[in-house]
Amino acid sequence: MSEPLPSVTLTAWPRLPNRWDILLLPLVFGGLFLLAWGGHQMTAPYTFGAELPISLDPAMLPGYALRTVLRMAIALACSLLFTFLYAKAAVGSRRAEQILIPLLDILQSVPILGFLSITVLWFVQLFPGSLLGPECAAIFAIFTSQAWNMAFSFYYSLRMLPKDLYQVANLYQLSAWQRFWKLELPYAMPGLVWNTMMSVSGGWFFVVASEAITVSDRTVLLPGIGSYIAVAIEQRDLAAVGYAILAMLVVILITDQLLFRPLVAWADKFKFEFAASQDAPQSWFLELLRRSRLLQLAMALPDWLWERIRPLMLRRRKRRLPLPKLRYWRRVDPWLDVLWMTVLGGAAVASIVFLARFVSTEVSEAEVAHVFLLGGYTFARVVILTLLASLIWVPVGVWIGLRPRLAQHSQPLVLFLSAFPANLLFPVVVSFIVVHHLDPEIWLSPLMILGTQWYILFNVIAGAAALPNDLKEAAANLGLRGLLLWRRVLLPAVFPSFLTGGLTASGGAWNASVVAEVASWGSTTLTASGIGAYIAEQTVRGDHPRVALGIAVMSLYVVLFNRLFWKRLYAFAQRRLAFD
Amino acid sequence: MSDTETLLELRQVNKRFVATDRREDIVVLQNIDFSLRPGEIVAILGRSGCGKSTLLRIICGLIPASDGQVLYRDRPVTQPVAGISMVFQTFGLFPWLTVLENVELGLEAQGVPVAERRQRALAAIDMIGLDGFESAYPKELSGGMRQRVGFARALVVNPDVLLMDEAFSALDVPTSETLRGDLLDLWLERQIPTRAILMVSHSIEETLMIADRLVILDSNPGRVKAELPINLKHPRDYTSPAFRRLVERVYEVMTATAVGEQRAVAGIGYRLPSAHVAQLLGVLDEISHPAYQGLADLSALANALELEVDDLFPILEALQLLDFAQVADGDIHLTLHGQAFLDADIQRRKVIFGEHLLKRVPLASHICRVIDERSNQRAPESRFLRELEDHLSEDEAERVLQVMIDWGRYAELFAYDYDSGVFSAENPGEGPTAV
């Protein structure tokens, strides 16, 4: 991503390093060293099933944290690559779009454990005798908690690209490569950065599930914060849970300061607006990067190399590549469409038959019905919890959003809160339920919405903060107060952004049910009946047909719920409540 | 190349849009023929919807023509070519690139080495009067400065032909005059290598200030209605009698057939012009002013009301359609109905307007009849949209229905509920209230 940074000519060579470089150099070399160490650890020899000792000694935590971060970073890199390829493919062809986008919807609804339990053995076989197998499985699991919403965000950005910019790019015959770096990526950047931050939070939420891999009664504990938490919970070590929280806090703060703040501040220049905004996001680290001469040189190097290489490539390529076809989909051959739909339909029927046969070898019809019932329980929990969370966070969000100073600081806090893994609350919740003899069916449920309720809060804050000032003044001028003010002004104004938050929150709650419907603290394990618990239990037992059944049923619920409820509300909000 | 040679030639260019499940295509441009010779500035003038922006995009290879050919230096244009560049109405600047990077973009795409690229971009920035702003982002600049970046970016690639798509219309009057003057100076002093300029505009005075030749486009479908040579010497003075005569001549040509010609295509598919009732009243009010006494010169009217062709002509067409005024040979005069409409009070005006709608707009009477025939006196908009789409494109059908709703509501012919998209006979507010 060298291109969009401030360009620097290489005439700056003779200059000496400045004081910013002196600050930055240790950081860079330290980072490189840690990377090398972590990478070495990941490829250590290992036979599947062997015990990997996890120590609860807090001194081990920095090392564990590093390895967790490394996994997340690799997963993030994969997610980015996936995002670019997937979204470009979806935008590039109407037929691809017809499958890829609904597919993304479904993939988003599959819980992380589902991917993990099915892929882990495959990864282990891919790298026999090395820790790389389980590591890859963990990275893949994290990837699945990150990639989908990033791909969605990039896809929507590509679809929303202003037409005149496309025409400029066409007119000056930008190559597909130039088009990507000069037009598509910059335009998508603000949305992509925000979704990346959400994705990383999601990765943290499932950190235990992705590192403490239990398959077929054998548990692999990959060294990392997640495994540390798992062991701490198993051994009822409250102090260790505290250390883990502290370590997570530190790591999230560091990534926020060194990665996300600079990214947000940098991505601000890509916002598609032609009015200079008053308070642009700031980042001390970005300042440091921008002022460091050595780094600027390093960033200019790829550009410089590219300029040298390109003439060679141009000479070889006499004819220009055909212009990428965009949005000229109107003219279509109906027969090809029919053929395409037939192929798709056939594939769908074949998959259903295959899946049904795979499941029916083991599972009776009564059990299938039972799984649907379990899905119903979880469904009820998701609905009630989303409702409760909305009742609490919408008023709070509006209150904060109307106060700009408070609203500004809400973003990092929300990201931390949504990153907080449910497992860390297990000690508190389990002890509470056991001591007070409460019903786990009800009292375990709040764990599901724990991580995702913040999206409601955050989006409502953003919506309320964006409320046009003249509307606020008009409302005050008319003397609107109390209930009337909320009903006529505040609630309609934040409704569209509330929907975005609500959709994210309820979707996340479904996924979280896998880690939230079964909670344990030491030897005490509490279970709430629901499809999340079903999937978790079958994963531990390594019963693949039942895992597949559980996932399929859950996806069905999620997709239907989104289509029949959220998407309709969206359409309504777009028609009625948009400001324009 | 000698001066008699043509740079750009259009041969029978047609543009049709095909929509699915439609009997006939929608013709946007019909048999456009014209040529651009070295050393001239040609302006294409037309009302909105005459396809002039589409024509420019066909010329520079951004969209393909349905039939016919665009020849640039005797070679057909099928995709963007290096010798033709364009300035956009909305500037088309990349907000994340600095002024310099925006200007360099076209050179970068051509693979010009970095040193040469920088030098040429700086020269273009210098020439267009942007020096000092090289490192600024577009959002830091005013509209006029942004369009200067647009010009620098278009000129830096040394185009043979410069296309301008309403390049000045997003700017305020003094800014656009300054920029236009600067561009004209560069052109007249041969400071830019551009050999011909083709501009599209809806402002008559703007085109007459610069162009050597005027191509007037008719609308629905767009076709060349007339070509006018402009032999005024630079610098031109828009208050001079010769200039005023030309303005009037253009109005005459434009009104000769443009307004009212559509009446041949009667029926519900008539493209109702986008004009609001308040605008109609404003124009009627102006014509009835004692200075005109019911007969006004269009150029004078346009001046007095500060209306460009794009806004003025739909209003004229609506007035004529409803029989409130007659337009011919560059003049407009009030009819008796128009006088009565103007003299009536607010409630009476609604009644008159409703009567004229029912009598003269088939779509209005059609909607009322359908609502009447239904037992519940309600009809969904989708039904009328489907009918309109037999004659019009999807967007156009929606626009026409929008105009119809606006007029019908004013005349209280029918009610329309936005949420449900239902037309009904009842008065708004009397039915079940919207949530």
Image: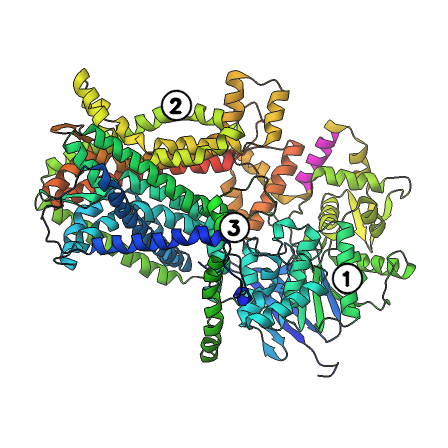
Are the numbered discs 1 and 3 placed on the same chain, yes or no? no
User: x and y percent of residue A441 in the render?
Assistant: 20, 24
Of all chains, the one bearing label 3 is A
Contact, mark 2 vs mark 3 (Cβ under 8 Å): no
User: x and y percent of residue A530 in the render?
Assistant: 19, 31
At x 48%, y 73%, the residue is A308
Look at mark 2 in the image and give the residue it sits on.
A392
**Dot 1: element:** helix
Q: Is residue B400 above or below residue A565?
A: below
Residue B209 shown in magenta? no
Q: Is residue A106 left or right of residue B346?
A: left
Camera-near label (2 vs 3) is 3
Residue B350 shown in magenta? yes
Q: Quadrant of the C terminus of chain A?
A: top right
Give the residues drawn in magenta, as a range: B348-359
Name the dominant secondary structure of the magenta segment: helix
Look at mark 1 in the image and give the residue it sits on.
B182
Q: Look at the image and name its color scheme.
A: rainbow
Look at mark 3 in the image and give the residue it sits on.
A270
CA gap, disc 2 and disc 1: 61 Å
Closer to the camera in the image, B260 or A480: A480
Closer to the camera in the image, B265 or B221: B221
At x 73%, y 83%, the residue is B2
